[in-house]
C-alpha cells in the first residue's frame, strides 16, 4: 500500500550535527596483550600502531601504509594474448580441465604473485622496576581514538600510578605516546619514570640514536617474487621530557627520573605514486617533527580528537545495556552467543567505523586485507587488495554509516587501476578500456595471479566501479560523477570488447572467467559467464547508462551499452530451487557445496537486482542458495551472509549469523575479525550488516527496521545515510516498533518511507527535516 496523504508527517526543526554517544564505547582488558590479536589498534589512515600495554616492556608495532615490498612493475605476460582464443575454444567445448591448464600455462601474470604489505618494525619501551603492578587496565576508547594503559606499582603513599596514552593523529601526522608516572595522592610529585626506548625491525635497516633525544631507523624495502625493492623508508622517534634526564647509549635512549615523557613517532617512505618512488622520507619526517615540536600534548590530543569525532560522532547506536557490558571485552565475546549483551553488537558496529576511519582517510592508501595493521614481512595473502570480495566489503559501511570521505582512497585506487588496467587490457586481450582481475597491490598490478582457479577472473575492476555509482546514489554529487564516469566507462568498454555470445541462447558472457574461487567440475573453476559476472556487468552498464544521461554525454556509447545489457545472461533458478551459480545448473554437483564465497548472491547484496518485493522468485532462490551453502564460514563470508539475510528481511536468521561472527572463533580478543587468521573485511561486513538490519534504501525506498531481531526490542540509531541524499538523523524504536524517525533531505525530492508494509511519500526541499511517527499509520 502506498499512502500519499501525509497525516503522520510533520515538520520539525531538526538540528543535524555531532551526536554525543550515550554508551561509553570502550574496549577494555585486565591484562597486557600476549598476542598481536590482543593488542589495540590506532591509526590515522596512513600510520598505524598496535599497542600491547606490557608492564615491564611496552611494544608499539608500527605500520606506514605505503611500505610494501617491490617496486613499480608491469605484470603483463607476452604469451597471454595468443593463447586466449584457444582457452575460449576449450571452454566452449566443455573441456574445462584443459582450459584451466592452458590458462595456468599461458594467461597468468608475471610474476605469479603480487607484492606484500609489510611492517615498519616496533618501538620497544623497557621500564625499570616494573614488577608488581596492581590495578592494571588496558583500553581503547573509540570516542577519542586513544589507547590507554594504567597501572600502579607499590602501595600506600608510595604507590606510583603509571598512565600511557597512544594515538595516531590525522592532523599532525604523527603517532603520539605520552607516559606519566606520579605518586598517589601527592600532586606535583614525580620523577618516577625511568625507561629505555629502542626500535627494532625485520626490514633491512640501520638504527641509530640522534641528538641524544631521538632514534632513527633508515630502511629499504625488500624484493618479492623477483621484483626488486625500490623504496626507501624512515621512522623517527623523538622524546620530550618533563623533569628527569635523557642519554643515548648504543641504539637506545635512556630516560631517568622523569615526571612524564612525550614521544613522537614519524614514519614515511619514498612512495609517491604506483609509478613514482622519488619521495624523500627523511625530509618528510623532518617537516612533520618540526611542525609538532612546539605543541603541547593537550593541543595535539584536542586536535586529534576533534578530527576523529568529526567523522565518528556522525552516527550513534544504542541497543540497550545489560550487566555484561561491564565485563572485559574478550569475556564479552566469549559470552555473546549464549548471553544477552546488545551493547556488544553496538560496540562491534562502532568498532568497524573506528577501524575504517583509522585505516582509510583522504590521502592514504585504501584499507587492505588487514586495514593498515600488519606485523609481518610476509602476511597472509600478502595483506593486499583482494578485489573479488574483500576490498569491496571493506567499504560496504562507508556510505550508509556516514563515512563517505573514508572511501576516497578506494576511488583513488580505481583511478590508478584504470591506468595500469588499460595496459593489461591491451596486452592480454587486445581490448580497449581497462581490466583488473582478482587482486591488486601498492603498484596497482592488474593481471591474473596466484593460479588459474583463483586469478582468472576479469571482473574485479567492474565491481570496484559500482562503488563510484553508489557514492553518487548516496550523495547526488554531480561533480563527483563527472570525474567517476570515465573510470566506469573504461571498465565497461573492456567488456564491450571482450564479451562473447554463448552458443545456447546468444547471451553475452565473459570468457574465460570463474565464479570466484569455486570449482564446478573436479578442481576446475574456469568457465564462461558465471552468474556473478552478468550481475556485476548489469550494474556497471546501468551505472554508465544513467551517468551518461545525467551528464548529457555519450549517446552512442549509451545505446551500445543498452543493447549489450539486454543481452547479458539472466540470473537463473536451478533444479534445487536455488539461484544458479553458473550458466548451467551445476550447483548440486559442485565439489564444495558449503563454499565460503556466495558470489552469485551479489545480485541480492550488495546489488539490488534481486529483491524480496520486486523479484520474489529470485529472492526465494537466493534464500535457498544461502540455506544450501550453510551459515558458518570464514569471517568475511559470515559478514556477507549477515548482509544477505538482512536483505531477505529475516531478522532472526541475520541475528543468528551475527552470533556466529561475534564468537571467539571469528572475533579475536581485540575484536579484529578472524578469517582466521586476522582479516579486517569481516569487521566491515559486520558493521554494514548491522546497518542493513536497521535501515535499507535500495530500490528508491527507505525501509525502517527491515530486519530487527527480538534481541534488540528497544533502541536508537542516529545519523545513518540513505540513497537519494537522506540522513536518518534519528530512528528510535520500542517493543520492536518504530517510535519516531527524523529524516533530513540533502537534495530535495520525494522521500519514500516504507515501514510495516506501508509506504508514505514525502516531498522534500534540500536541507529540510521532517518527522515520521508511524503510530498514526493505519495498517
Ligand atoms: C580470497 C578468499 C580467501 C581470503 C583471500 C584473502 O581468496 O577466498 O578466503 O579471504 O581472498
Image (cartoon, grey):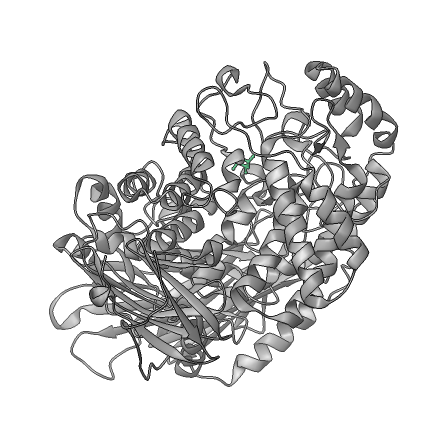
Q: Give the image quarter of residue 194.
A: bottom left
Spot occupied by residue 641 in the image (x, y as percentages of width and height): 41, 39
Quadrant for the C terminus, please.
bottom left
What count of labels does the image hold?
0
Residue 708 lies left or right of residue 205; in this view the side is: left
Q: Is residue 489 above or below residue 191?
A: above
Spot occupied by residue 202 in the image (x, y as percentages of width and height): 58, 46
Q: 107 or 689, which lies in front?
A: 689
Q: 646 or 524, which lies in front?
A: 646
Q: Give the image quarter of residue 488.
A: bottom right
Spot occupied by residue 690 in the image (x, y as percentages of width and height): 35, 52
Q: Which residue is pictured at 35% across the width and 82% down the height?
A: 15
Residue 292 visible? The answer is yes
Spot occupied by residue 545 in the image (x, y as percentages of width and height): 69, 55
Q: Which residue is pictured at 18% across the width and 53% down the height?
A: 327
Residue 270 lies left or right of residue 150; in this view the side is: right
Amino acid at each position: 500500500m502506498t499512502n500519499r496523504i501525509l497525516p503522520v508527517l510533520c515538520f520539525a526543526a531538526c538540528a543535524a550535527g555531532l551526536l554525543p554517544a550515550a554508551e561509553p564505547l570502550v574496549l577494555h582488558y585486565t591484562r597486557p596483550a600476549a598476542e598481536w590479536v590482543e593488542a589495540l589498534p590506532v591509526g590515522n589512515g596512513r600510520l598505524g600502531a598496535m599497542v600491547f600495554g606490557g608492564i615491564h616492556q611496552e611494544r608499539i608495532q608500527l605500520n606506514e601504509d605505503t611500505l610494501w615490498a617491490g617496486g613499480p612493475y608491469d605484470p603483463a605476460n607476452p604469451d597471454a594474448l595468443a593463447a586466449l582464443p584457444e582457452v575460449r575454444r576449450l571452454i566452449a567445448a566443455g573441456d574445462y580441465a584443459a582450459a584451466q591448464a592452458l590458462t595456468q600455462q599461458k594467461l597468468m601474470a608475471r610474476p605469479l604473485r603480487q607484492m606484500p604489505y609489510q611492517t615498519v618494525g616496533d618501538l620497544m619501551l623497557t621500564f625499570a622496576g616494573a614488577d608488581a603492578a596492581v590495578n592494571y587496565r588496558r583500553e581503547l576508547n573509540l570516542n577519542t581514538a586513544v589507547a590507554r594503559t594504567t597501572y600502579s606499582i607499590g602501595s600506600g603513599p608510595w604507590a606510583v600510578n603509571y598512565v600511557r596514552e597512544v594515538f595516531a593523529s590525522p592532523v599532525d601526522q604523527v603517532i603520539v605516546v605520552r607516559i606519566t608516572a606520579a605518586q598517589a595522592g601527592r600532586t606535583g610529585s614525580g620523577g618516577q619514570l625511568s625507561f629505555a626506548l629502542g626500535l627494532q625491525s625485520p626490514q633491512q635497516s640501520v638504527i641509530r640514536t640522534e641528538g641524544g633525544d631521538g632514534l632513527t631507523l633508515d630502511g629499504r624495502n625488500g624484493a618479492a617474487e623477483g621484483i626488486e625493492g625500490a623504496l626507501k623508508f624512515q621512522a623517527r622517534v623523538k622524546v620530550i621530557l618533563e623533569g628527569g634526564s635523557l642519554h643515548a647509549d648504543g641504539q637506545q635512549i635512556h630516560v631517568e627520573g622523569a615526571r612524564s615523557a612525550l614521544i613522537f613517532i614519524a614514519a614515511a617512505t619514498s612512495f609517491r605514486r604506483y609509478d613514482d618512488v622519488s619521495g624523500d622520507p627523511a625530509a618528510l619526517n623532518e617537516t612533520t617533527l618540526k611542525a609538532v615540536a612546539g605543541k603541547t600534548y593537550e593541543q595535539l590530543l584536542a586536535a586529534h580528537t576533534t578530527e576523529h569525532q568529526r567523522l565518528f560522532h556522525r552516527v550513534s547506536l544504542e541497543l540497550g545495556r545489560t550487566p555484561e557490558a561491564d565485563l572485559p571485552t574478550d569475556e564479552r565475546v566469549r559470552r555473546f552467543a549464549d548471553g544477552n549483551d546488545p551493547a556488544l553488537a553496538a560496540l562491534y558496529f562502532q568498532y568497524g567505523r573506528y577501524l575504517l576511519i583509522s585505516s582509510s582517510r583522504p590521502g592514504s592508501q585504501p584499507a587492505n586485507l588487514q586495514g593498515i595493521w600488519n606485523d609481518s614481512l610476509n602476511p597472509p595473502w600478502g595483506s593486499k587488495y583482494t578485489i573479488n570480495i574483500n576490498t569491496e566489503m571493506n567499504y560496504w559501511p562507508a556510505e550508509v554509516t556516514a563515512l563517505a570521505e573514508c572511501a576516497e582512497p578506494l576511488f583513488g585506487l580505481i583511478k590508478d587501476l584504470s591506468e595500469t588496467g588499460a595496459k593489461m587490457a591491451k596486452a592480454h586481450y587486445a581490448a580497449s578500456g581497462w581490466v583488473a582481475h582478482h587482486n591488486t597491490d601498492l603498484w596497482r598490478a592488474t593481471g591474473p595471479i596466484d593460479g588459474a582457479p583463483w586469478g582468472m577472473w576479469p571482473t574485479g575492476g567492474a565491481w570496484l566501479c559500482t562503488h563510484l555509482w553508489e557514492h553518487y546514489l548516496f550523495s547526488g554529487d554531480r561533480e563527483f560523477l563527472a570525474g567517476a564516469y570515465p573510470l566506469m566507462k573504461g571498465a565497461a568498454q573492456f567488456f564491450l570488447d571482450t564479451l562473447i555470445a554463448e552458443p545456447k541462447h546468444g547471451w553475452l558472457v565473459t570468457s574465460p572467467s570463474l565464479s570466484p574461487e569455486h570449482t564446478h567440475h573436479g578442481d576446475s573453476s574456469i568457465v564462461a559467464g558465471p552468474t556473478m559476472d552478468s550481475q556485476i556487468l548489469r550494474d556497471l552498464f546501468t551505472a554508465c547508462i544513467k551517468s551518461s544521461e545525467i551528464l548529457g554525454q555519450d549517446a552512442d556509447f549509451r545505446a551500445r551499452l543498452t543493447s549489450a545489457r539486454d543481452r547479458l545472461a539472466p540470473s537463473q533458478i536451478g533444479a534445487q530451487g536455488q539461484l544458479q551459480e553458473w550458466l548451467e545448473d551445476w550447483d548440486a554437483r559442485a565439489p564444495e557445496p558449503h563454499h565460503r564465497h556466495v558470489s552469485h548472491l551479489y545480485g541480492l547484496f550488495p546489488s539490488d537486482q534481486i529483491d524480496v518485493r520486486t523479484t520474489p522468485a529470485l529472492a526465494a532462490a537466493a534464500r535457498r542458495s544461502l540455506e544450501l551453502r550453510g551459515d558458518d564460514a570464514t569471517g568475511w563470508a559470515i559478514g556477507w551472509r549477515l548482509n544477505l539475510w538482512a536483505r531477505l528481511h529475516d531478522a532472526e536468521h541475520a541475528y543468528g549469523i551475527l552470533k556466529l561472527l561475534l564468537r571467539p572463533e571469528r572475533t579475536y580478543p581485540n575484536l579484529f575479525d578472524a578469517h582466521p587468521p586476522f582479516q579486517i573485511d569481516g569487521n566491515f561486513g559486520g558493521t554494514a550488516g548491522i546497518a542493513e538490519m536497521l535501515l535499507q534504501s535500495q530500490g528508491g525506498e527507505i525501509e525502517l527496521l527491515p530486519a530487527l531481531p527480538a534481541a534488540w526490542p528497544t533502541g536508537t540509531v542516529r545519523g545513518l545515510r540513505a540513497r537519494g541524499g537522506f540522513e536518518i538523523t534519528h530512528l528510535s524504536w520500542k517493543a520492536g516498533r518504530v517510535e519516531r524517525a527524523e529524516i533530513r533531505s540533502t537534495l530535495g525530492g520525494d522521500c519514500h518511507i516504507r515501514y510495516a508494509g506501508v509506504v508514505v511519500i514525502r516531498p522534500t526541499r534540500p536541507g529540510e527535516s521532517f518527522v515520521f511517527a508511524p503510530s498514526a499509520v493505519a495498517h
